[in-house]
Amino acid sequence: MIVSVASGKGGTGKTTVTASLAVSWSRPLVAVDLDVEEPNLHLFLKPEVTDTEVVTIEVPEVDESKCTYCRKCAELCQFKAIAVMGKAIMTFPEMCHGCGGCMAICPEGAISAGTRELGVMERGIARGTLPCLTGRLRVGEAMSPPLMRYVRSCMRAESAERSLDVLVDAPPGVSCPAMSAVADSDVIVLVTEPTPFGFHDFKLAFEAFSPYGKPIAAVINRAGLGDNRVYEFCTAHNLPILAEIPYRRDIAEHYSKGMILAEMDEGLGELFTKLGQDLRRMAKEARHA
Amino acid sequence: MREVVVISGKGGTGKTSLTAAFAHLAESKVICDLDVDAPDLHLLLDPSVVRDEAFISGHEAIIDPEKCSGCGLCASMCRYDAIDQDDDVYRIAPLRCEGCKVCVAFCPEQAIDFPPRHCGQHFMSETRFGPMVHAQLFPGQENSGLLVSRLKKEARVLAEERGLELILCDGAPGIGCPVIASLSQTDLAVVVTEPTPSGVHDLERVASLCDHFRTRVAVVVNKHDLNPEQTSRIGALCKEKGYTLAALLPHDTAVTEAMVRRQAITEGEDSAIATQVRQAWRTITDLLHS
């Protein structure tokens, strides 16, 4: 079972919710940080890193002694990563999406696979038993989707091999990275706050993720702040609000110390235990439907 | 002409609220929302759209089921796992297709069409604070970096046409494609952070991205009073790296209240935080001209 914690707007509490769910989950679990641009889950779960894998993408490496400057590679490349000018060929590896087209189309076999580092994937164990996967994009690297693809494939393998549930901390937004982060989910939980920005981006995310046809639930963070429109929207769209985390300064201070909300007091502990149960129930119902 | 981009690494630290206030305070500027994925600045600035254009970028592959012989070569060559088998024909999953054209080029039946992709809309608008360029990328689309570059170019043209001296940009969270695009030709990155482990961690990453592109950094710590210890860590980081610590702003619900009224925090009656935001803008203006 894969549960993704997402949001349109950043900073609404995705990581807070993911970390709290992870420590209250009733079944064996792997916690996955797919917000590879700014991974934060490890700051709360504090896993001991057991393995760091460098993740790369294939980029063209040209053997100029074989190149006839026929331009077939440059004509195929959609990303301006390879250019032929007269009797010169140039590659721009940072533009390359790793499609492999240039290597496949070169009639001389002059292009082989070099690599560009995308970032790393860290495997770790939190609290002695909780496996964690973290994708971490290299600073300066523009493309997060191929790194995320790699982390997702490891996450699926891990989950299948050891029969683990998966909890995903997704990146904000609704563009390519956010959409691909939730693609594997059995249930998506959208964390929002009842402010105009929170509500606007919540609607964007709801509309973006709905076509996947997966069950979606809402968690309202900082409840009591802002206005009521997110509640009206959830009612109108039959979107269950599974939890409300109150707007309290002591909660913000607790978070600012890197502590996990579910462990702040008994009430919050129960809130996340129940949230976890509700999400598991929704995912099971969707599987049987 | 100068260009400022407000970014944060971590989302939800107050970029847009701060940009709206700066848009209120700055003179002679074009306002630009570079968060093309989840834009929010328009919620405070209430723009009247003057020009609305389609953002066409890249292409998408579409298999003609009539011509597909079901050989599966496309699916075996696709590096994005974007081609699903559907009985004995194949189908492209548009959300996974990166538009690389490999399947189009190698299909033995020439059964794959490759039309341009409509990725979103971009707008030129008027607001009570001046002209604004902004956009909305469609869900799941790539090329947000190209759309950001397009908006920046439009903002520059607009500023030149009207003789405006500043381009004030609200950036996206993260450190990826759209953020990298937003840093190009920028004079100053204002990084808004908060005194939390995530805030500090993400500040370090986004500021080192700015260093990588040799963009000057000014830091604003929002909600500084939540955790004085983390705030002094940020101060020490700024000192060590040579970033200007432009302002410490308090945790104040007046920010959300202004948002609910659809106003910039500096509009209307002046609150304590509004005075501090005014001071922050003066500091940033001085930096821009130093």
Image: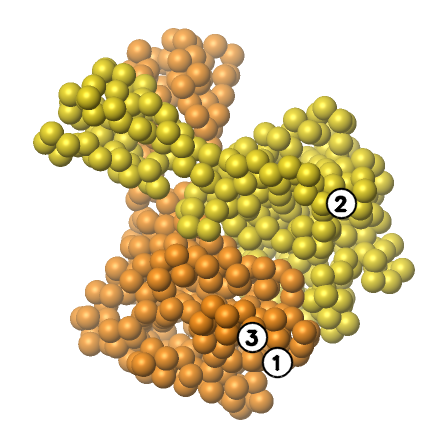
Chain colours: A yellow, B orange
Residue at the right extreme, as displayed: A266
SS at badge 1: loop
Point 76% across, 67% down: residue: A254
Amino acid type at mark 1: Pro
Looking at the image, is mark 1 or mark 3 nearer the viewer? Answer: 3
Q: Which chain carries label 3?
A: B
Asked if residue B222 is positioned above or below residue A128 in the image, the reply reads below
Instruction: Measure the C-alpha gap from mark 1 to mark 2.
Output: 34 Å
Residue A213, located in which quarter of the rendered image? top right
Residue B54: give x, y in percent of width and height.
31, 49
Considering the image in quadrants, where does the C terminus of chain A appear? top right
State the residue position of label 2. Answer: A126
Residue holding disc 1: B250
**Residue B272, placed above or below residue A47:** below
Placement of B150 over or under B42, stated as above or below: above
Disc 2 to disc 3, C-alpha distance:
30 Å
What chain does mark 1 sit on? Answer: B
